[in-house]
Image (tube, grey):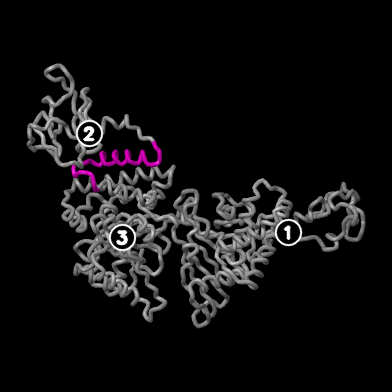
Amino acid sequence: MKERLPPWKRLMIGPDKDSDAFAWDGDPIDAVGRSLDRSDPPMPHDPVASRNGFTSLFSSLVERDVRTKPSYTDCWLTSLSKDVKVISRYSTQFARVTVGLAEDGQTEYAVVPVEYSFPDPANVIVSDVIGRIRSTYRTRGGRLDRDSVMGAARAALTDRYEDIKKACNDSSDLERLVDDMCSAAYRHSVGAGIFEVLLSDSHIEDVYLDAPCDENRIHVTMNGVDGVNAHMRCRTNLMVDSREMDNVVNILKRDSGLRLCESSPVLETDFREFDARATVIGYPMSPNGYALAIRKHSARPWTLTRLLANGTMDARSAGLLSFLVNNRSTFLVCGPRGAGKSSLLSALMLELPLSQRILTIEDTIELPGERMRSMGYKVQTILVDERNEENPLAGAKEALRVSLRMGESAIVMGEVRGEEARTLYQSMRTGKAGSTIMGTIHGDSAASVYNRVVHDMGIAPEAFMATDVIVTLGTLKDRRTGNLVRRMRELVSTSKEPGTFIDISDQDRMFDSPVMKRAMQTAQMGRRDVVKDIRARSAMRSHLVELGRTDERYLGPEWILASNDLLSRMPPTASAESILNEFKRRTAGSYGERFDRQQEAPQRMPDRRGDDDLVPGVWRVHRRRREDGRLGGAEPFEETVLGDSPQAGHEVSPEHQRVRGRRHVQPSGVGCRISPRRPHVRRRRGVVYL
């Protein structure tokens, strides 16, 4: 029950005007002026009975309705809920953030932008600068990009350094303060305002605001808070005025050149400055005003190591997916919205070999084509603008038809939805599609995807069997925290019977699948070789995850490319352990880490080559005393030096007198390294010659 205030007259009677309200020494009086003895027990909720009773009582009644903001902004900060259980605290470029669990069970995202913590005199200066920027542009014109506006703001603040020092009472970090004031001036003059503060947070994935905007809080979707793979939907402490919403809509209309009116009440466009996709609906579709949804693209490309690090999949599944991509399998990634379909599709793209040409078809740029081009990949992006098509599905169909005529390439479709699916499966059945084909589709299981494609899209069941692998992602609710956690729920392949699937995450059933039989035939590999390849890929990605706990750069796409390149260069006889050891050696020298070579020495250079060799073709030349009593030399040895190496069985010319390698046999007889990349070394039992 809410507390009730005493009668108004009782609140209004107090000390004299010239006395301190909280240091009043006189006896308190009641509403009619009668003196009250201090020894009498206070009346319930009597503000006169305590020094600050009225203030505390009034605050308890209105604290949840209090809003604050600087005068030059159009966004209000609401008060926080009581008894919030803090989950995380951190700072972004423009704000301080607290994420916590409120008493009503909802997750709160409380943000305090830097300008909201400025003292009032500093906010007066920022307001003057914003007014000066606007008046200058109205009278003289000029550029309104970020650098120009912040330069004008800094020029306006240069002459007011003394005022800034006096306003903040602390000039120890004056330069930082001026930078914050310049960025605030840009955001609230020609920038995106509070939405720029939210989109600068790397943990935020979605921002949405329902109509009417001045009666609803902004809500966000977060992931990766404190390194946890949790998909959290949070309410913020932000409420915007209609001017703030109009400002964002005008920015989107200006940058896209598209209209938003009653005859066209939907605006879908890229928010290029923040690498995001924005959707706005207006009247009459939204009768209460504008509604906004912004979806950010990941700033860092998703890789299998990142998905492994956040718990989306296990190491063996990551190694299996890498092996199947390398052997040109076709993929469908399915799941509900927000399950991470595009993230996994991006990770699978980065498993393709560097020599593979890639064509991407998408209606909004989400796949890491630009990053892959900077790494040396050959990526051609085909952007489908459905707004310019009379039939929106025809654009994707035409883009797919064109891509099939652009030569042998891996085709990656952002989403398989309609008519393009028919063209895609027809090409796959006739062999015109060429290499790997990947795409995403909405569905919660392989069976539901099959029913949708066959019954809703009209694809023949036999044609659907051209899909090799279906990966299902989902979100599971954490019973402890209530957050949604992303997981790979299903990894299956199609079988010979339409509508039936084989669980290839089960190693016993994996080799019964047609995709695995085809991969073994194409790569000329047996079961043992396939298992070794998958183990090596899994082990290298697990090692990168361990290194990524201290240095996140190891989770990047460059190390995926390096691991696949190493695996392709290793001889077929290399074991998974030896490949991992060589990969550890390479990562040890990358960022200054130390690798314990002494512990690995028995495995790297055993007396006889075994399954734990670092590199096949690297063996130890045994100490042997010559007939003349000296050590070393090229005299016959008692043991076979190369043993069962790939070079075994080749004859040599007796005139060769030295052992090939990175260094020659030393007189001490400690041995040499024989490079596996050199031409074959022929040998005769007991003696190694060139």
The residue labelled by disc 1 is 3
Q: In what quadrant of the picture does the N terminus appear?
A: bottom right
The residue labelled by disc 3 is 378
Instruction: Specify whether residue 587 is painted magenta.
Output: yes
Q: CA distance from mark 2 to mark 3?
A: 37 Å
Secondary structure of the residue carrying tag 3 is strand
Residue placed farthest to the right in the image?
34
Q: CB under 8 Å between callouts 1 and 3?
A: no
Q: Is residue 630 above or below residue 340?
A: above
- What amino acid type is highlighted by mark number 2? Arg
Q: Is residue 681 visible?
A: yes
* Left or right position of 596 against 650: right
* Residue at the image position 13 percent from the left and 30 percent from the top: 657
Instruction: Specify whether residue 320 is painted magenta.
Output: no
Determine the image quadrant of residue 110.
Answer: bottom right
Q: Earlier in the sequence, mark 1 or mark 3?
A: 1
Q: Position of residue 664 (x, y in %)?
A: 21, 30
- What amino acid type is highlighted by mark number 3? Lys
- What amino acid type is highlighted by mark number 1? Glu
Q: CB under 8 Å between callouts 2 and 3?
A: no
Q: Earlier in the sequence, mark 2 or mark 3?
A: 3
The residue labelled by disc 2 is 673
Q: Position of residue 231 (x, y in %)?
A: 46, 56
Q: CA distance from mark 1 to mark 2?
A: 85 Å
